[in-house]
Amino acid sequence: MMENNENVLDKISKLAFTTAIIGICTIGICPAFGAIGIAAPLVMKHKKAKLSKETQARNKKAVLAGIISLVMFVLDIVLLTVFGLKLGWLQ
């Protein structure tokens, strides 16, 4: 039973890391990717799940990538606003 539980947590960790990387690859256009990359590892940490060293390392990378993705989203909004006003797209 415990082995199945570890497999599920490992799969969730891989999903969080993958979505965070997708968030970076899309230049932060969709903040949900970054949010998933941050939320899943934080829930595992909050619930004190027993994780392997590999999964813990992947979770740290997912959180970092998720934060980068969300920062890129904010930069996208700022750039859109600045250039939109200068070019007359937003009036």
Image (cartoon, rainbow, N blue to C red):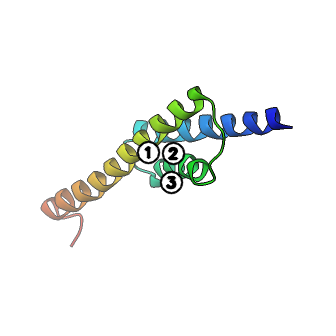
Residue nearest the viewer, comparing 20 with 6: 6
5 is higher (above) or lower (below) than 91: above
Q: Is residue 1 left or right of residue 65?
A: right
Image quadrant of residue 4?
A: top right
Sequence-wise, the earlier of marks 3 and 1 is 3
Sequence-wise, the earlier of marks 1 and 2 is 2
Identify residue type, mark 1: Gly
Rounded to the nearest angstrom, the CA distance separating label 1 from label 2 is 5 Å
Identify residue type, mark 2: Gly
Name the residue that disc number 2 marks. Answer: 37
Identify residue type, mark 3: Ala
Q: Which mark is residue 32?
A: 3
Task: Assign the C terminus to one quadrant of the image.
Answer: bottom left
**Extreme residue in the top direction:** 54
The residue at the point 37 percent across, 42 percent down is 27
**Extreme residue in the right direction:** 1
Mark whose residue sits in front, 3 or 1: 1
Q: Position of residue 43 (x, y in %)?
A: 59, 53
**Extreme residue in the bottom direction:** 91
Q: Determine whether label 1 and label 2 are within 8 Å by CB.
A: yes
Q: Residues within 10 Å of mark 2 (few under 14, many from 20)?
A: many
Residue nearest the viewer, comparing 80 with 55: 55
Q: Position of residue 36 (x, y in %)?
A: 54, 50
Rounded to the nearest angstrom, the CA distance separating label 2 from label 3 is 9 Å
Q: Position of residue 12 (x, y in %)?
A: 65, 41
The residue at the point 61 percent across, 48 percent down is 44
18 is higher (above) or lower (below) than 80: above
Name the residue that disc number 1 marks. Answer: 66
Residue nearest the viewer, comparing 71 with 30: 71
44 is higher (above) or lower (below) than 21: below
Q: Which mark is residue 13?
A: none
The residue at the point 58 percent across, 49 percent down is 40
